Structures are given as C-alpha cells and as structure tokens.
Amino acid sequence: GQNIDQPTEMTATEGAIVQINCTYQTSGFNGLFWYQQHAGEAPTFLSYNVLDGLEEKGRFSSFLSRSKGYSYLLLKELQMKDSASYLCAVRPPGLNNDMRFGAGTRLTVKP
Amino acid sequence: GAVVSQHPSRVICKSGTSVKIECRSLDFQATTMFWYRQFPKQSLMLMATSNEGSKATYEQGVEKDKFLINHASLTLSTLTVTSAHPEDSSFYICSAEKRGAQKTQYFGPGTRLLVL
C-alpha cells in the first residue's frame, strides 16, 4: 500500500522562503510529483523527481531522497498568490502511470 | 501546450438521475486518462484509469457499474455517474497523460457535481 504524509497547514510571510515536507512509505516507487491547487480549481503541475537530488525551476525547487522516502518543495520569494494547497504525489511502479496523492498542505502567505 | 478541458464545469441534478462528464485533451493525444474524486478539504482519490480502446481499471471500492467510463478516442474520455445520490456530490477531476520523458499528468479544471 501507500502512505504519504504532509503537514496539514503552514503559514509564511510574503517574501520569505518556505519548505513543505513529504514523507512516503510505498510498495515500490516510480517518481514523485508536486502539484499546486488553488481552492476550487484543478491541480497544476510543479515538479517531478525520480532521482535523488534537487530540481530547481524558478522560485520553486523540489528535493528527493529515495533511501529516506522523503521529499520537500521549497518556495522562495513568496508571493500572496502562492497561497494554495500543495499536493505531494507518488507514482507506484507499474504500467498505468497513476499517482497516489497525499492529503495536501494548505499554505497561507501573509503580508 | 498541454490543455485538458472538462464539461460541464458544474452540474446540479436530482437524485436517481445520471450525469455524464467529458474530459478532453485539446492539444495532445492521451492514450491514458485518469479520473479522480475530491471531497472538500481532502486530497484527490483515484477512481479509475482509462485507456483508449479498452476497459477502464477501477480502484478498490469504486463501483464500475455506477461510474461508467468510456475512452473512445485519443482525446476524449467520459465518466457517467449513474443513479446519482447525494453522497456522490463531489469535485470530479480528470487528467490526461502526455507522452514524454516524465509522463506527466495534466489536469482538467474539474466538474463540481451536486446531487439533490
């Protein structure tokens, strides 16, 4: 089975840096995704990690350690529009390429 | 680009009726589409995986006779909620897999279903 854990809520200040952690215990692993979801909208793709290390994309970076079953999403220079839920998703091995989502972390950015 | 659309965006229906939701990949071909359900303040739960030209694969606990999935072409999958009940009220989101190195899923805007 899959067990994916994220903090439920986080608060940060505009302009600051925030790190959202995700730990997983899954029967097999074939990649980890981060998605951003604003309230009432569909998720939008942020990042994908399949190998250990840091992937940087503008203000967003994602890190993966497969041996530790751990990932984090780093958001720099926070903006008010970054207030959203951030979903960690793990892709199990297999041919379907499906994903299993964590419950999401609701980030609130304050002025 | 990788745009996925859903129609309708919002639907209200009476208990016992059936509702069809369409998911289209607008600018790419998607051999695989996924259907998710999301209840308020909860995460996405995978309902089924839909492969073009074959039967959908349902997750455990999802009734295939209640949630009919058809993936007739490389750009269209439909989900029909049959004999809908108030507990089926939810946010239904589809995603389509775009072929490439990452095999990333791109999500549609979602359909909010309210069953009265």
Image: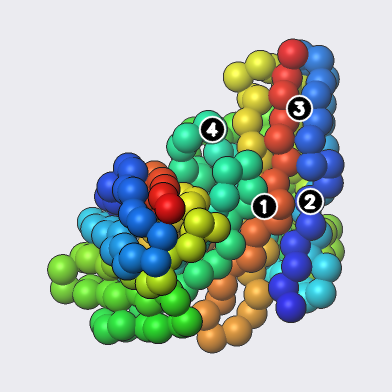
**Image quadrant in which you'd find residue B62:** top right
Q: Secondary structure at mark 2?
A: strand
- Nearest to viewer (mark 1 / mark 4): 4
Residue B81 against residue A51 in the figure, above or below: above
Q: Which mark is residue B6?
A: 2
Q: Amino acid at mark 4?
A: Phe
Chain under callout 1:
B
In-front residue for pair B95/B57: B95
Q: Residue at x 28, y 74 (%)?
A: A64
Circle 1 is placed at which residue position? B94
- Nearest to viewer (mark 3 / mark 1): 1
Circle 3 is placed at which residue position? B82
Residue that lies at the very extreme toward the front in this rendered image: A111
Which of the marked residues, 3 or 2, is nearer the chain's N terminus? Answer: 2
Chain under callout 3:
B
Q: Amino acid at mark 3?
A: Thr
Q: Are marks 1 and 2 in contact (CB under 8 Å)?
A: yes
Q: CA distance from mark 1 to mark 2?
A: 8 Å
In the rendered image, residue A77, in percent from the top left (x then y), is placed at: 41, 71
Residue B75 visible (yes or no): yes
Around disc 3, counting alpha carbons within 10 Å, would you say few (fewer than 14), some (14 to 19), or many (20 or more)? Answer: some
Q: Which mark is residue B39?
A: 4
Q: Which mark is residue A39?
A: none
Around disc 1, counting alpha carbons within 10 Å, would you say few (fewer than 14), some (14 to 19), or many (20 or more)? Answer: many
